[in-house]
Image: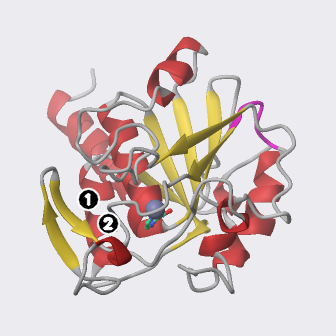
């Protein structure tokens, strides 16, 4: 008979390993209940864009390769009104990357970006995900930001993505895109809270890293039970 304490001890050690990254031998295989989530691969976040993420374009070939391995692909698109509350230009005397207190909490102020219908808001033309089934837009309420693809920054207003995924029987999400420390992290953490299994594919993401945000984001994702993997950990 297996000793219960040593058995649980072993399971505990495995749990700890899984939380901090996969061991080299364990590949994850997407199936009909998995979806690739491609976050905000938009011109504004790429070189030459108004809120360019360093090396942001490097995620594109990785995402294009992964997309072929998934039966379900969903893209997100940051989609702000002109004069959006998250823009520094909407707060006289403030500058980008300042933090202000808004009714729903602290808000980092950004350069104007991803204004509805502009070229900057378009998905990169190099992104090759023709099998994407849904493009979900977020951040379109003038007075509320939404890093998360599930829940706006007021923590009350749902985008509908969680219900969409659930209705389609999707249980595991593989999150990629920009930026690791904002839209990727908030999407991943909210998806955990909504009951999904969540992997963040580190080399398919890049971060902004302002005021320690990247470290804080990984810490928050870790605590939420998000699994941090590399694209090479995913098997076709
Ligand atoms: C994002 C800042 C502002 C993101 C969007 O996609 O991570 N970051 N809006
Ligand atoms: Zn935004």
Tag 1 near tag 2, CB within 8 Å: yes
Query: Residue 219: x, y in percent?
Result: 26, 65
- Position of the C terminus, as image quadrant, is top right
Please report the residue visible at 71 percent of the width from the left and 77 percent of the height from the top.
58
Q: What stretch is highlighted in magenta?
A: 69-73
- Residue 56 lies left or right of residue 166; in this view the side is right
Q: Is 47 situated above or below 124? A: below
Residue at the spot of label 1: 220
- Residue 153 lies left or right of residue 135; in this view the side is left
- Main secondary structure found in the magenta portion: loop
Please report the residue visible at 45 percent of the width from the left and 27 percent of the height from the top.
162
Query: Residue 22: x, y in percent?
Result: 50, 56
Query: Residue 2: x, y in percent?
Result: 27, 26
Q: Nearer the viewer, residue 94 or 159?
A: 94
- Position of the N terminus, as image quadrant, is top left
The local crowd at label 2, few if under 14, some if 14 to 19, many if 20 or more residues have their Cα within 10 Å, is many
Residue at the spot of label 2: 217
């Amino acid at each position: 008979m297996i000793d219960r304490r040593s058995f649980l001890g072993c399971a505990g050690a495995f749990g700890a390993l899984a939380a901090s990254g996969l061991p080299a031998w364990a590949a994850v295989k997407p199936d009909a209940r998995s979806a690739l989530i491609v976050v905000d691969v938009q011109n504004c976040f790429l070189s030459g864009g108004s809120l360019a993420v360093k090396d942001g374009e490097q995620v594109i070939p990785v995402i294009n390769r992964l997309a072929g391995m998934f039966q379900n692909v969903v893209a997100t698109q940051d989609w702000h009104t002109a004069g959006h509350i998250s823009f520094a230009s909407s707060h006289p005397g403030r500058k980008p990357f300042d933090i202000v207190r808004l009714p729903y909490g602290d808000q980092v102020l950004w350069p104007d970006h991803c204004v509805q219908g502009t070229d900057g808001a378009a998905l990169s033309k190099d992104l090759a995900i023709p099998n994407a089934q849904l493009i979900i837009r977020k951040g379109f309420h003038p007075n509320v930001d939404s890093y998360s693809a599930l829940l706006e920054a007021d923590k009350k207003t749902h985008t509908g993505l969680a219900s969409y995924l659930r209705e389609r029987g999707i249980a595991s999400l593989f999150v990629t895109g920009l930026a690791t420390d904002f839209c990727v992290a908030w999407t991943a953490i909210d998806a955990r809270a909504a009951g999904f299994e969540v992997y963040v594919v580190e080399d398919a993401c890049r971060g902004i890293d302002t005021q320690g945000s990247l470290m804080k984001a990984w810490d928050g994702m870790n605590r939420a039970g998000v699994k941090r993997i590399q694209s090479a950990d995913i098997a076709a």
